[in-house]
Image (tube, grey):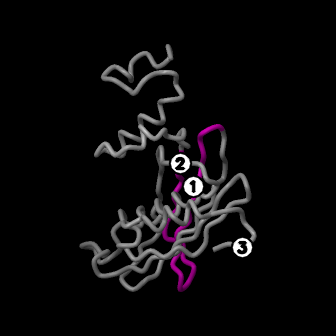
């Protein structure tokens, strides 16, 4: 972990609770922020279960590595942040036995939105594997009632995200007449 950066226990706790990343063998190398923008570095070995029918690493798993590094970087400053969209470009293939390193860097934070770039390289030779650009959205803090488990965490996040729009939880017509809000 970076030294000399502000408190990071919130993002370290988030990582500790990330069963998906741990299950894929990801290792957090670094996370930090400068008070405004965050960064992270995550390593993942390519194992037998990650190789597809072409004998190369499945692109969805490269995406997952990017997404994990992205999440760490955009949550490093302490704001509860989720992805609102992303793009990925696969440059070259990764193969069984490779170790990949994803380096994420927030490029901009404006209002509740952000842009984060993630570069994936092969650890042994630095070869570029993929480039990912993520768009993030900081959620408004949830109240205790909103934080109660509902069985659908995406719905809980969506409800807390709309709370600052001046309306109750979204209903069946919540997507209509957005300009009138």
Label pair 1/3, CB-CB below 8 angstroms = no
Residue displayed at 47% across by 56% down:
88
Residue under label 1: 75
Pinpoint residue 31: horizontal percent, then vertical percent: 61, 67
Numbered marks: total: 3
Whichever of labels 1 and 2 marks the residue nearer the N terminus, that label is: 1
Dominant SS in magenta: strand
Label pair 2/3, CB-CB below 8 angstroms = no
Dot 2: within a 10 Å radius of its alpha carbon, few (fewer than 14), some, or many (20 or more) residues? many
Is 13 in the magenta? no
Pinpoint residue 142: horizontal percent, then vertical percent: 49, 40
Residue under label 2: 81
Residue under label 3: 3
Residue 110 falls in image quadrant: top right
Distance (Cα) linking label 2 and label 3: 23 Å
Distance (Cα) linking label 1 and label 3: 17 Å
Secondary structure type for disc 1: helix
Whichever of labels 1 and 3 marks the residue nearer the N terminus, that label is: 3
Q: What stretch of residues is rendered in magenta? A: 111-136
Whichever of labels 2 and 3 marks the residue nearer the N terminus, that label is: 3
Label pair 1/2, CB-CB below 8 angstroms = yes
Secondary structure type for disc 2: strand
Dot 3: within a 10 Å radius of its alpha carbon, few (fewer than 14), some, or many (20 or more) residues? few
Distance (Cα) linking label 1 and label 2: 6 Å
Q: Is residue 3 left or right of residue 177?
A: right
Pinpoint residue 18: horizontal percent, then vertical percent: 42, 65
90 in relation to 93, above or below: above
Secondary structure type for disc 3: loop
Residue 148 falls in image quadrant: top left
Looking at the figure, which quarter contains the N terminus? bottom right
Front one among 167 and 26: 167
Is 129 in the magenta? yes
């Amino acid at each position: 972990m970076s030294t000399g950066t502000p408190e990071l226990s919130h993002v370290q706790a988030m990582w500790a609770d990330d069963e998906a990343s741990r299950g894929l063998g990801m290792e957090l190398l670094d996370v930090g922020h400068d008070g405004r923008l965050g960064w992270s570095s995550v390593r993942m070995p390519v194992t037998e279960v990650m190789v597809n029918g072409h004998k190369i690493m499945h692109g969805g798993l490269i995406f997952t590595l990017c997404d994990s590094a992205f999440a760490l970087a955009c949550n490093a400053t302490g704001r509860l942040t989720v992805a609102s969209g992303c793009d990925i470009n696969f440059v070259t293939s990764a193969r069984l036995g490779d170790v990949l390193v994803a380096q994420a860097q927030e490029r901009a934070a404006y209002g509740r939105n952000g842009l984060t770039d993630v570069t994936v390289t092969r650890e042994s030779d630095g070869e570029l594997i993929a480039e990912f650009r993520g768009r993030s959205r900081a959620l408004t803090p949830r109240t205790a009632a909103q934080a109660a488990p509902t069985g659908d965490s995406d719905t809980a996040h969506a409800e807390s995200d709309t709370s600052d729009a001046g309306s109750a939880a979204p209903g069946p017509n919540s997507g209509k007449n957005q300009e009138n809000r």
